[in-house]
Image (spheres, rainbow, N blue to C red):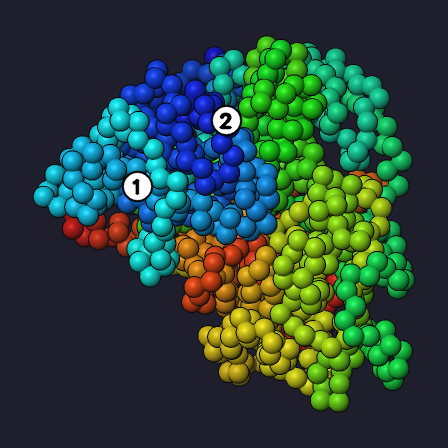
Amino acid sequence: MLTIHVNGEAKSVSASPDTPLLWVLRDHLHLTGTKFGCGISLCGACTVHVNGAPVRSCTLPLDAVGDQRIETIEHLAADGDYTAVQSAWLEEDVAQCGYCQSGQIMAATALLNRNPSPSDAEIDTAMAGHICRCGTYQKIRAAIHRAAKVTQIGSTQA
Amino acid sequence: MSKPPLDASRRTFLKSSSLLATGSLLVGFELPYSLASAPKANATASIMADAFIRIDRDSTITLLMNHAEFGNGVYTSLAMMVAEELDIDWQRLRWEAAPTEPRYYSPIFGEYLTAGSVSTAGAFIPMRTAGAKTKALLLQAAGRLWQSGATQISTDAGWVVHADGRRASYGALIEVIQEQGLEPPETVNLKPASAFNVLGYPKKRIEAPEKVTGKALFGIDIKRPGMIYGAVARPPVYGSLVIAFDDKAARAIPGVLNVKAIDAGVVVLAKDYWTASKGAKALTVQWDDQGLGQLSTASFTEEYRALSKTDGLLAEDIGDAKAVHEAASAVHEAVYEMPYLAHATMEPMNCTAQVFDDRCEIWVGTQNQGNDRTVVAKMLGLPETSVVINRTLMGGTFGRRASKTADFITDTVQAAQGESVPVQIIWSREEDIRGGHYRPLFVHRLRGTLDDAGYPASWHQTAVGQSIMQHTKHDPAYMVRGIDIYSVDGCLQAPFGVFPYGTAYQIPNHRVESHNPPKVGVRPHEWRAVGHTHTGIAYECFLDELAHLGDKDPLALRLHLTRDHDRMHQLLLRLKDVAGWDEPLPAGRGRGMAARVYSVSPIAQAVEVTVEQDGTFTVDRVVCVIDCGFAVNPLGIEAQIQGGVMLGLNAVAYGAIDLVDGQVQQSNFHDYRALRFNQMPPVEVHIMRSDAPPTGVGEQATTPIAPAVANALFHATGKRTRQFPLDRFGFTLKA
């Protein structure tokens, strides 16, 4: 049994220590919002936050997680409200099939957390590791800009 | 901020509830669901005013979706059609996948199938009718309740309202309907387009809230009590059979529960997927490659090239192109070659199944559940009604999840046989890329001449590639005189077989032939836009060649050739305008275009590229004009166009599956590359205004982008590429 800290809770899991965090989340904790896409950190569908930074959970073994803070897509609206990024995603009607969007949203959230007003080039860099086969890239860019604007207005008012 | 949908109620799957089961005699869309036959046990819970609409006591409206949602936006379009007539409260709208019953079959295909960009066209009358009948029933109930004439009563977002101010929620009227045994009318009048206030306006996806919170349920997300996981060791040569296997090492892995051979290979069952996949890698399997280990795409290409010089099956012969070419002093000739393509959906293939003695239950994302059910029932020796398919959302398909053999379902069902619990099989990305189902490799040979004015006088095209439809259940419907209509779709001037359209062009002498080389090595499969994915490149690039040969502007040439095709002609005039086609470009940049008719809808695109000295290029701009008849959801159309452009650009830039010694060389996104965020060109979408019935948008945009880019590269550099993908032949999309 290993204990990991996911979405603010300590969770004991009985998975083999080499199990990638992705499959611990999905098969053991039933947090299926984090998706399997490639298994070798090429597509970004499995992106979660580890201590706030975007990380590919498909290649992070359980025994390397330790007591780091894991947050998944399920955590974002956990208090009952959409985050600015989720709201922007809805406003721009980004998703098509939606399968990659958890990873895209986690990456965009991490980007905006460290850079509240990213340029197009900075967005390119942050999102280049996230594949969408439906072609939502143009709307993702618009949603990130929208979320940045909303966040800034929010912080100005605060 | 608004609240996310934290309840999971809408994601509960439709079981064959007694309410639904009682409608078994009803076939088709026009017959109202018989309320009188609804069992009393459920009488207070909800009503089904129509096969597609269930109303609960709390006024929740649940739509039974008979087309699959895989990013196409069809759930939203269908809901809009109902809402246009029924006046729903969108906050109380839920959806479920409709069960595999004849009354839910596509009216266009006559089976339960979502394909061919025809869902919106097929649903446009039935779903509005369902909404109108339900509304009529509710109005009738309110009239009885209030003992009031119909002119006093109307609806307002989930409520029936009386002119005097009385209101009754839809849910509150269920009791009246049931007590008085009310039935919806046999026929209803539908609103004219001029009265629409939902259809034709941008509507955001109804399932979007679940897709931004991680709650959307894809096939891979299914969890059933006691469920175990499976991973399959598949053969390196597609189509090989298992001779023997050694599972000692696999069984030694803690958590591995069982190992067995199935048709697809050897499956390892385990307590979680990671353990199952480790087990599959630990197997040693001896394969019989059935003699397929000699095959290579290089030899296919050689063979097809040679075949393209010989007479094929004659698909079309307008005028006499052969005679023109025999008499001509010079015939322009070119050969275009397009490789195999994998679908590479973001959600790899997967399925969950539980097999009981007398029935089988399946949870899967599929476009093709009617056929899936038939295949599974036959395999298990069960009546079809004993196989229940619960359709989930899909993380993309591009045609892959319409499998004629139900391959990604049968492997799970076979694995689940003999197990007492549900089994979920997930394909790794490597299994998915190497899975053997591909857009077929095609070679097109084209010859043409010009008339004295420099316009095309003759066209002779020979298409060579494996047939998708031959020897499948769609043979003969999609085979005409031995010709797969997908092999030549987009090459013919006249309608062909079940396709009621040709190209928009008229060339006086027009001959098209087709060869079906043996279906070996892989399973040729539909891939978004199907035949157009290769015919579009061959036709539109060769037309571009003829334009330059005759010193004609490519768009002006197409305007000339579409003189008798008003819809495309008008569309091209619009493209010329919105693309700024005649504006000069700086050195190093190029402009190209293509115009196609796919599944009835005309579409054209103009693209601008910048090419560096070493052939590295960027796509700077894509302008797309589509005429899809009445535009049901402009927002959804925009998304489909952007997506279609991306997938087509991705394929022409990088897409290729190679066989060497029968083995697929590609395996994951490093060698079967996906277009990345920064490579996505801005796509401008223009929709022609039309009152014609709606036609397809889902696949259309994939067709012109590849030839438009290739033509733009020629325009920029003077170098014509006739082999694909571009990155192997001199042009690399900038990373």
B370 and A27: which one is in front?
B370
Numbered disc 1: what chain? B
| Above/below status of A95 relative to B487 | above
Residue B186: image x %, image y %?
39, 40
B531 and B678: which one is in front?
B531
Q: Element at badge 2?
A: loop
Residue B404: image x %, image y %?
68, 37
Residue A47: image x %, image y %?
47, 37
Question: Which residue is at 54% across, 33% downward?
Answer: B102
Question: Which residue is at 22% across, 30% downward?
Answer: B172
Q: Is residue B731 visible?
A: no
Amino acid of disc 2 = Ser
Q: Which residue is mark 1?
A: B136
Q: Looking at the rendered structure, which numbered label has been put on residue B24?
A: 2
| Above/below status of B242 relative to B649 | above
Left or right position of B239 against A109? right
Distance of label 2 from label 1 (alpha carbons): 23 Å
Residue B310 occupies quadrant: bottom right
- Name, please, the residue furthest toward the bottom: B452
Amino acid of disc 1 = Ala
| Above/below status of B65 relative to B652 | above
